[in-house]
């Protein structure tokens, strides 16, 4: 099967996975409060149930992401993770006690850890310019599931029968339904998901033929022309101006050393005792630990005479800051330092903060929505399902707009728009929802506007931070990086429901902390705004062409 068709089917399957995750959230959230009440649970069990789901996802995300980075076996990881979703939802359907209900969400949450592997997979297989739109489309699939879930509740609430020893009613039916859907998804993953090769491998394979052809041609020219001149001029000194390939390796950075079978690269060459210039018969990158210094420089046995070459100062410098460490080099302490350097950079910390603050505020408000609608409007499962359905339509519209906007501006601008909307929403909730005033119609209008404003900023922040995060972190550790990011989000979705569920009667305190977190994030964002850009990626062929213009040096 051709690669293009495999790619389409794979992304279709990923869309289904996120669709089901949204459906599961939407069919369970409107009914879990009443379900717990039928089992004699205290109000704080609502926060426990929502937090348990996030806790297991927080722990499993980095593990699945690291597994994906090491093996690139995303398909096996998804199949394994889905087993937890199946078992967890069946436990939710059984519902013998409130503790079994909490345990069911804990087990099902392990399956969400596969999201780290999926985001890492997409980060490796998509180009920078396409990543925002791909991520927005996939995240929109989850919102479609959030919209379909409440519609399904309209039918699931009609269930009232027995299945063997189990009772199927409007509270247990969502668990049975999602258990069946996740089982069907296993078959879809088996037949329609492929572990696509990373984008860099495809680019490397495409460039390999051209590079080999160019090597032969340049070698012939170098041996007859400039390489020979370098051999005459360098003489016994053995050092020219160009970089030279050797018997075991080639050039790093500005200069290198040739061997018995070495060839000339660029203007000068190595002559004398190390051979006449002969062409680039060897790879440009090889294993020469005896001459390898830092990235972009070479340590030679005898320093060359100081012959200034103005062309060298014009060469672009490639910073190794965002590059992963060489495999097999260093010990565990160097690996630990590499991880800290990767995740404690200023721009990464800002994106972690954005992810945490937005999810904390969102889940805290979602937790109090059901008790508030019950207290002020006497809403039941039907009315709450309609609310979530309408909210999902708004979020999908927002993702479509962000999909369009990301093609015309940068992620940090999109993030700034979302931050402004979130501030407006929180201020509105502090003024009107903390202590609703007026008659029924006025209170309902205040509630609807507050929810609308809160949801409107979500797509901007969600898409911008995940896309920008995938671009500023190493491609080779995308799974682990996305796992850490999702763990930060998991921590927010644990603390958010606990904070909101415990302060339903103290709205000013609850909303006050949310406003303080937004203000903190706004300060960090304003100071770090210049750094919130994707690093410039220079194509290898373009780099060689530029080096030719600078004097024929090879990198």
Image (cartoon, rainbow, N blue to C red):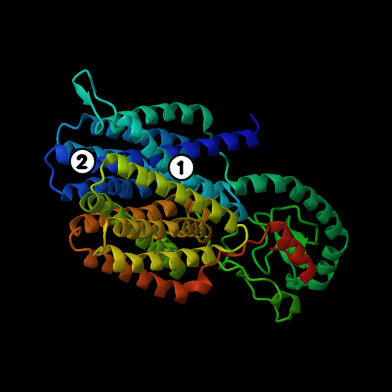
Give the SS element for disc 1.
Answer: helix
555 vs 142: above or below: below
Q: CA distance from mark 2 to mark 1?
A: 25 Å
As drawn, the residue found furthest toward the right would be 224
Report the residue marked by disc 1.
144
84 relative position to 409: left or right: left
Q: What x and y, as percent, mark residue 441?
A: 31, 56
Report the residue marked by disc 2.
34
Q: What x and y, as percent, mark residue 110?
A: 32, 41
Q: Nearer the viewer, residue 275 or 176?
A: 176
Q: Which residue: 44% across, 41% down?
A: 18
Q: Is label 2 or label 1 in front?
A: 2
Q: What x and y, as percent, mark residue 358?
A: 37, 60
Q: Nearer the viewer, residue 148 or 381?
A: 381
Q: Please say whether residue 191 is visible from this viewpoint.
A: yes
Q: Which residue: 39% across, 36% down?
A: 151
Q: Please say whether residue 109 is visible from this viewpoint.
A: no
Give the SS element for disc 2.
Answer: helix
Point out the image quarter for the N terminus.
top right
297 vs 2: above or below: below
């Amino acid at each position: 099967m051709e690669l293009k068709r495999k790619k389409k089917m794979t992304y279709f399957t990923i869309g289904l996975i996120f669709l089901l995750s949204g459906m599961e959230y939407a069919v369970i959230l409107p009914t879990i409060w009443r379900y717990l009440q039928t089992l004699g649970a205290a109000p704080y069990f609502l926060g426990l149930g929502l937090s348990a789901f996030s806790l297991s996802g927080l722990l499993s995300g980095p593990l699945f992401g690291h597994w994906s980075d090491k093996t690139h076996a995303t398909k096996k990881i998804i199949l394994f993770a889905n087993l937890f979703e199946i078992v967890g939802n069946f436990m939710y359907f059984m519902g013998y006690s409130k503790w079994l209900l909490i345990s069911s969400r804990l087990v099902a949450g392990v399956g969400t850890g596969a999201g780290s592997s999926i985001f890492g997979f997409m980060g490796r297989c998509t180009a920078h310019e396409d990543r925002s739109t791909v991520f927005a489309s996939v995240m929109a699939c989850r919102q479609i599931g959030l919209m379909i879930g409440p519609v399904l509740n309209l039918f699931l609430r009609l269930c009232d029968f027995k299945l063997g020893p189990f009772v199927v009613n409007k509270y247990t039916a969502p668990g049975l339904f999602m258990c069946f859907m996740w089982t069907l998804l296993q078959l879809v993953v088996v037949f329609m998901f492929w572990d696509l090769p990373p984008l860099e491998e495809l680019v490397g394979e495409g460039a390999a033929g051209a590079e080999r052809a160019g090597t032969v041609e340049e070698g012939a020219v170098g041996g007859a022309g400039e390489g020979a001149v370098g051999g005459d001029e360098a003489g016994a000194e053995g050092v020219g101006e160009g970089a030279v390939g050797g018997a075991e390796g080639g050039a790093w950075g500005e200069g290198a050393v040739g061997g018995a079978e070495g060839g000339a690269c660029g203007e000068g060459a190595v002559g004398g005792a190390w051979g006449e210039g002969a062409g680039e018969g060897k790879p440009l990158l090889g294993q020469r630990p005896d001459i390898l210094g830092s990235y972009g420089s070479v340590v030679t046995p005898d320093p060359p005479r100081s012959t200034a070459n103005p062309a060298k100062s014009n060469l672009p410098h490639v910073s190794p800051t965002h590059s992963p460490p060489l495999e097999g080099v260093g010990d565990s302490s160097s690996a630990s330092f590499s991880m800290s350097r990767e995740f404690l950079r200023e721009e990464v910390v800002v994106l972690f903060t954005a992810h945490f603050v937005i999810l904390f505020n969102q889940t805290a408000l979602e937790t109090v929505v059901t008790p508030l609608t019950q207290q002020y409007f006497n809403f039941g499962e039907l009315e709450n399902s309609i609310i979530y359905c309408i909210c999902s339509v708004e979020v999908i519209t927002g993702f479509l707009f962000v999909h369009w906007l990301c093609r015309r501006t940068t992620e940090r601008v999109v993030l700034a728009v979302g931050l402004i909307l979130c501030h407006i929403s929180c201020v509105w909730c502090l003024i009107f929802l903390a202590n609703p005033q007026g008659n029924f119609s006025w209170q309902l209008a205040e509630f609807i506007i507050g929810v609308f404003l809160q949801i409107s900023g979500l797509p901007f922040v969600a898409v911008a931070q995940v896309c920008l995060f995938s671009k500023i972190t190493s491609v080779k550790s995308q799974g682990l990086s996305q796992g850490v990011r999702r763990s930060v989000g998991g921590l927010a979705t644990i603390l958010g429901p606990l904070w909101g569920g415990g302060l339903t009667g103290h709205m000013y305190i609850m909303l006050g902390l949310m406003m303080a977190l937004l203000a903190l994030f706004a300060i960090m964002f304003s100071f770090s705004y210049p750094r919130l850009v994707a690093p410039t990626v220079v194509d290898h062929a373009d780099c060689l062409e530029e080096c030719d213009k600078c004097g024929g040096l090879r990198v």
